[in-house]
Image: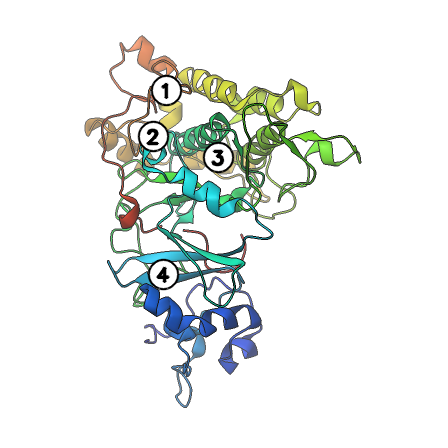
Amino acid sequence: MSAREPQEHPPRATTLEPDLVAKGELISGEVYWKDHYEWLLDQGYRLRPRYEPNWKPSWAGTDLDPYLCEDSEINLSNVVNDATSLTNGKVVALKLTDVTVHLEEVEITRYLSKDALRSDPDNHSVPLIEVLEPPDDRNSRILVLPLLRPFDSPKFETKGEAIQFLDEFVTGVSFLHRHRIIHGDISINNVMMDASEMYPEGFHPVVKDNKLDWSGEVEPQGTRTEKPPKYYLLDFGLARQYEEDQPHHVWGPGTDTSVPEFQTGNPHPIDSFAVDVYCVGNMIRTEFLDGDPQRPGRNGYYGFDFLRPLVTSMTQQDPSKRPKMEAVVTTFREVVKRVSSLTLRSPCIPIPDSGPRALHAIRAAASKRHWWIQIGYIYRKLPAIPAAHPKSTGKDQPAKMESSSERRDGGAEETNPSQRGDRKESQEGNSSASAPASGSR
């Protein structure tokens, strides 16, 4: 453990009273991890020094500012923590789950990590490393998962980078539905990314903009266009898998409580697949089109209105009129075909809270630096829509997706997320990405 230099407060993942940090005491949700430190060590996973049984704050008895010390980082989540694998030195995420509450989380996560499914590039479910069974509680399991970053950290530089995320997002949910699995809790907290190529030296599991060793801030070693991430769905606590002829009903909402079916007090069973479709569409709407009034600062982005007709169809009040996820993937890719390469390479500009929005957008879009970088990407033959892996030619696979300008130019530049090269997919053991270790977004 060491203090950071220079002596200024680093960005923190937690929001707590200063005296609580200074006291150097574990909060209630952290005690479980301290109590299981030695057992986890025996299983091959070392928690951060804060959770050692005899931990004493590194700043105790010194003039050090607690905020500058790594072991002052408090984990606000009761069920998610991080650890270092003693096998390969990688940082992983640990998720504690109660199998009497989250009935199918372990089995569905295992199912989606079978070799036959893991090799399908349409599978965007978080890879499972292993399942641990705490000896003192037969109802608990700990899922060992890769450490992931939030899907929008760092920010999208171009619309094409955002399109890669959206393509993998809708493809991943369609893959679940193809296997008769509903997610049940689609939200921004449950879609993350493996950015291990962007951060080859890793990052701190709590303060993700810091280096793993707490020696300073970490910078990505390339953009999403240069080193495309892979996006994953996670948290299958409310997921269910149904047999082909089994009724697929759900009785309550997940994180997204705006689902129309849950607003009417309708006592009748609700189609859980249609609920997933709504939640996917609503997340695209709130994140990229209209913003979310419940989360200040998340106002959407300029220039994604071409997705509005699809989003509108996905969020219809009548669930029977919503498209199936397979049709969503096909329509999404057909829409993207009509977007020019110039648009895909243009900046992905967040809508500000206030001020002269139009002027803000014009200035950002006209940035000379941005366009010089894009010219460099074109020279290096980097596609306008990045791809971290080859796409399958399976059920969700449409024909080659070209932008309108590419068709006019004879297909000189490839932008189809289904046809973009043969980059080797990261192995799950090398993932440096996971569920957030503290706080909520």
**Residue 204 badge:** 4
Q: Nearer the viewer, residue 175 or 377?
A: 175
Amino acid type shown at disc 1: Gly
Q: Are marks 3 and 4 in contact (CB under 8 Å)?
A: no
**Residue 258 badge:** none
Amino acid type shown at disc 3: Ala
- Circle 4 SS class: loop
Tell me which residue sits at (33%, 45%) in the image: 195
Q: How far apart are labels 3 and 4 at the CA level?
A: 33 Å
Q: Earlier in the sequence, mark 2 or mark 1?
A: 2
Instruction: Please state which of the two labelled residues, at mark 3 or mark 1, is closer to the viewer.
Output: 1
Q: Earlier in the sequence, mark 2 or mark 4?
A: 2
Check disc 1: other Cα within 10 Å, few if <14, some if 14-19, many if 20+: few
Tell me which residue sits at (60%, 24%) in the image: 314
- In the image, is 354 to the left or to the right of 438? right
User: Residue 170's spot in the image, x, y percent?
Assistant: 47, 29
In the image, residue 406 sits, relative to residue 183, either above or below, namely: above
Q: How far apart are labels 2 and 4 at the CA level?
A: 30 Å
- Circle 3 SS class: helix
Q: Are marks 2 and 1 in contact (CB under 8 Å)?
A: yes
Amino acid type shown at disc 4: His
- In the image, is 119 to the left or to the right of 53? left
Q: Circle 3 sits on which residue?
A: 361
Q: Nearer the viewer, residue 401 or 45?
A: 45
Q: Circle 1 sits on which residue?
A: 394
- In the image, is 411 to the left or to the right of 99? left
Check disc 2: other Cα within 10 Å, few if <14, some if 14-19, many if 20+: some
Q: How far apart are labels 3 and 2 at the CA level?
A: 39 Å
Q: Circle 2 sits on which residue?
A: 120
User: Residue 166's spot in the image, x, y percent?
Assistant: 45, 31
Q: How far apart are labels 1 and 4 at the CA level?
A: 37 Å
